[in-house]
Image (tube, rainbow, N blue to C red):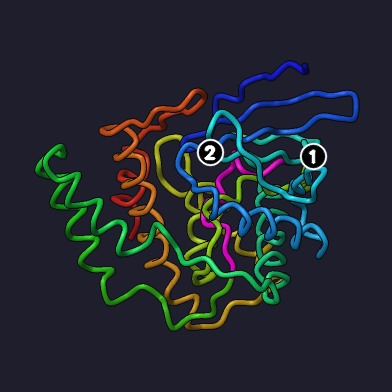
Amino acid sequence: MFPLQGIAQGITNSNYFLTTTSGRYVLTVFEVLKQEELPFFLELNRHLSMKGVAVAAPVARKDGRLDSVLAGKPACLVACLKGSDTALPTAEQCFHTGAMLAKMHLVAADFPLEMENPRYDAWWTEACARLLPVLSQDDAALLCSEIDALKDNLGNHLPSGIIHADLFKDNVLLDGGQVSGFIDFYYACRGNFMYDLAIAVNDWARTADNKLDEALKKAFIGGYEGVRPLSAEEKAYFPTAQRAGCIRFWVSRLLDFHFPQAGEMTFIKDPNAFRNLLLSLD
């Protein structure tokens, strides 16, 4: 038997460090994800690792499978990467993270498996109806107004492919100024690249008072464009993508707060952070 050390950062999964005689790993037990959905995410990580993207590669079982079952729940084991996340990124770290995200978008072009975005317009519209009875009048009005504005402006005409869809600061491990690994790909799906970039910028450039640091935003986008230049149409859509990113995470955090799920090592984050960021956007 090897000891497990809980990682109290997950919101929808329970994560543990596992140290064995052969190395250190991260064991993830999925509280929401279904067993049949796991191969997409694990094969994607393996694909990206083989293409030179810094990710935590999955560890196969003796029979070759990447997914397992633990205590009746889907589970997997991935390599534990060096480095750590940061709550206060530098411009250099933003630049290199943006560059790695662009590389990921490019090299995933030939990934053969498909996954539609499970947390996009249909999801947040349905979630809004569930949340309205527990929200203040102002929050309910804001949420409904933003969702209505996005209905015909989802960016489906823009370049798209495999996106991470959750590239927050705590999902990137850094070694100094460099990226040592992207982690937690369990919201990865097919979507437009501006939405993915906006989700990342919304968190990486977000200040303690939930506004955007323009220098960090510029650094992140600059790193991205150094690998994959943006079209004029993509740049014009970016502010809308930022609002969509705010809605996605405001809604998910509201659901976690008002309707918490059972999980051994899950953690509820402030649901108001992205509402406040949304209100600060031009």
Residue 106 located within the stretch drawn in magenta: no
Q: Residue at x 62, y 69 (%)?
A: 113
Q: Which residue is drawn at 29% across and 56% down?
A: 124
Q: Mark 2 points at which residue?
A: 30
> Which image quarter is the N terminus in?
top right
Q: Mark 1 points at which residue?
A: 175
Tell me which amino acid carries mark 1.
Asp
> Which image quarter is the C terminus in?
bottom left
Q: Is mark 2 on a helix, strand or loop?
A: strand
In the image, 6 versus 239, the foreground residue is 6
In the image, 75 versus 135, the foreground residue is 75
Q: Is residue 120 left or right of residue 12?
A: left
Q: In this view, does 19 lie to the left or right of 236?
A: right
Dot 1 crowding, Cα within 10 Å, few <14, some 14–19, many 20+ = some
Q: Is mark 1 on a helix, strand or loop?
A: strand
- Tell me where residue 103 sits by quadrant: bottom right
Q: Give the vertical position of 222 relative to 208 (above or below).
A: below
Q: Check residue 263 in the rendering and tell me which mark sits there, or answer none.
A: none
Tell me which amino acid carries mark 2.
Phe
The image shows residue 66 at horizontal and vertical percentages of 72, 49
Residue 164 located within the stretch drawn in magenta: yes
Q: Which residue is drawn at 47% across and 52% down?
A: 202
Q: Which residue is drawn at 54% across and 76% down?
A: 160
Q: Is residue 130 left or right of residue 189?
A: left
Dot 2 crowding, Cα within 10 Å, few <14, some 14–19, many 20+ = many
Q: Over which residues does the magenta segment extend?
A: 162-175
Q: Give the vertical position of 16 relative to 130 (above or below).
A: above
Point out the tag, 2 or 1, that comes first from the N-terminus.
2
The image shows residue 189 at horizontal and vertical percentages of 53, 63
2 or 1: mark nearer the eye = 2
Q: How far, Cα to Cα, is label 2 from label 1?
A: 27 Å
